[in-house]
Amino acid sequence: MPVTVVYPGTFDPITNGHMDIVRRAHRLFDRVLVAVAANPTKRPTFTLDERVDMACQALQGFERVEVCGFDGLLADFAAAHGSRVLLRGLRAVSDFEHEFQLASMNRHLAPDLETVFLTPAEEYSYVSSSLVREVAALGGDVSHFVADSVEAALRARLG
Ligand code: COA
């Protein structure tokens, strides 16, 4: 049976680090569903639609990758899309505690839902969306960290 993995995040914006994780998952699973969370508590710079659009453009070349926005429980989103596997990236040991909490809560909410972890290439181990936004807002070069389309969106929004 084809296995769909759900890769959730705020993706404000999607970075090459996220894309590196998607690339690795693409080799392992039949379908990768990138789930862009509305996540209003994080007060994202880009709207949900903008974040979905940016992820779609950045991931254009991948045949079995889809992007979808959601506003609700991740466990419900996964069930609605017929997936029993969540994917999260682990950049460093410091990510582990938060990820362990999320995985445990999701397991409590949906006991059949498993979380798997992949690590991005070392060159992205220190990248985060907020750091990329900060560097872009201050006029720094973020071309190594985001797709061209995302860089253009950052420039248009943050100057
Ligand atoms: N490359 C680059 N950056 C990465 C990365 C990678 N491979 N992996 C993680 N990050 C960064 C992100 O850019 C983000 O940076 P930022 O904080 O500077 O924006 C940070 O790590 C983690 O953010 P994100 O991946 O968006 O996760 P999150 O912890 O903010 O949110 C959700 C996680 C969206 C999965 C969670 O909030 C959720 O499930 N929401 C739905 C509601 C729900 O079900 N809640 C209960 C959950 S148990």
Image (cartoon, helix red, strand yellow):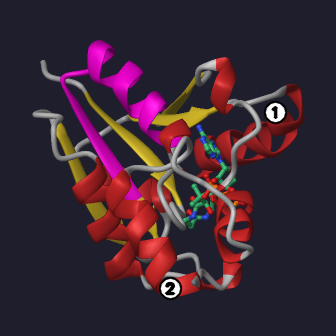
Under tag 2, what secondary structure?
Answer: helix
Residue 23 in picture, x, y percent from top left:
35, 26
Q: Which residues are magenta?
A: 18-35
**Quarter placement of the N terminus:** top left
| Left or right, residue 46 beside residue 62 | right
Q: Amino acid at mark 1?
A: Phe
Q: Which residue is mark 1?
A: 96
Magenta run includes residue 17: no
Q: Main secondary structure of the magenta part?
A: helix
| Left or right, residue 51 beside residue 60 | right
**Quarter placement of the C terminus:** bottom right
Q: How many marks?
A: 2
Residue 55 visible in the snapshot:
yes
Residue at x 44% of width, y 85% of height = 47
Q: Which residue is mark 2?
A: 157
- Front residue of this view, candidates 88 and 13: 13
Nearer-N-terminus badge (2/1): 1
Residue at x 39% of width, y 50% of height = 147
Residue 136 in picture, x, y percent from top left:
64, 68
